[in-house]
Amino acid sequence: MIKNIFFDFNGTILDDVQLCFDVEEEIIKEYGLPILTMDFYLDNFCFPVKKYYEKAGFDFSKLSYKVISDKFMSRYLEREGQETRLYPEVKETLKKLKEAGFNLYCYSASEYNILKKQLTNLGIIEYFTDLIASNNIAAKGKLEYGQDYINEHKIDATKTIMLGDTYHDFEVASALNLKPVLVSFGHNSKKVLSPLNVPIIDNFSKILEIAKNY
């Protein structure tokens, strides 16, 4: 029986795919690189994100990745309040899951305070038992601080689903021995996700049925 659900944030709860693509395209244009398509983005987006930029044509032997990363983050944060939104049925589904007794966690690569502010502004922070995010102190990656959290809070991985939208989310869930479930509408295409042979949902509300019947 499933007791816990870990939710990725960007691309799973928050529809920010178009904004990410638009900001990255702006930066690509500024450096005179070939313009890419949304299909290219969805088929090639990956972690670490530096690898995606290399696929897009950046040569980081001649340019600092930090410069590009900082450009992206500053522009993203400036625009995300106006140009992002919850996916359909997110709030209603989180409410139903909480009422059904599941422990809900938002598990993100974002910095903790940024994530907390976003969830508060979106009006859904009340549904989460806790937030699992970067604190920028120990320089740990998403997998490492996720494992630390699971160990410290004695979460039973065998009774935990992780819902994400990328190949990397599948990798993280698998490494943590969580049960991966993926959405088809995030930062990776269904073509990328389908070969993983895990449940893929086309509507956020479907996680309620999966959690009850897994």
Image (cartoon, grey):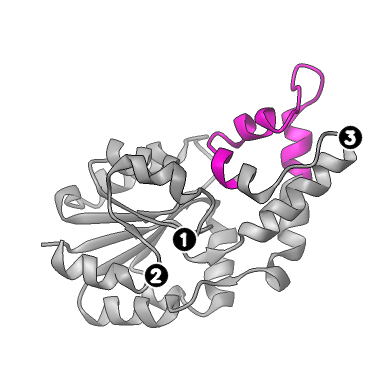
Disc 3: which residue: 32
User: In the rendering, which numbered label is found on residue 190?
Assistant: none
**Above/below status of 209 relative to 27:** below
**Above/below status of 20 relative to 65:** below
How many neighbours does mark 2 have within 10 angstroms: few (below 14), some (14-19), or many (20 or more)?
Answer: many
**Residue lying at 36% horizontally and 38% vertically, measured from the top left:** 171
Indicate the secondary structure of the residue bearing disc 3.
loop
**Above/below status of 210 relative to 62:** below
Task: Answer whether residue 82 is magenta in the image.
Answer: no
Pointer 2 and pointer 3: residues touching (CB < 8 Å)?
no
User: In the rendering, which numbered label is found on residue 204?
Assistant: 2
Front residue of 210/9: it is: 210
How many neighbours does mark 3 have within 10 angstroms: few (below 14), some (14-19), or many (20 or more)?
Answer: few
Tell me which amino acid carries mark 1.
Answer: Thr
Tell me which amino acid carries mark 3.
Answer: Gly
Disc 1: which residue: 12
Q: Is residue 195 left or right of residue 161?
A: right
Q: Position of residue 212 (x, y in %)?
A: 17, 70
Q: Is residue 79 left or right of residue 192?
A: right
Q: Position of residue 61 (x, y in %)?
A: 76, 16
Q: Position of residue 153 (x, y in %)?
A: 25, 52
**Residue lying at 52% horizontally and 55% vertically, measured from the top left:** 112
For the record, the magenta segment spans: 42-71
Q: Position of residue 38 (x, y in %)?
A: 66, 50
Nearest to N terminus: mark 2 or mark 1: 1
| Image quarter of the N terminus | bottom left
* C-alpha distance separating marks 1 and 3: 31 Å
**Residue lying at 40% horizontally and 65% vertically, measured from the top left:** 202
Tell me which amino acid carries mark 2.
Answer: Phe
**Residue lying at 74% horizontally and 46% vertically, measured from the top left:** 24
Pointer 2 and pointer 1: residues touching (CB < 8 Å)?
no
Nearest to N terminus: mark 1 or mark 3: 1
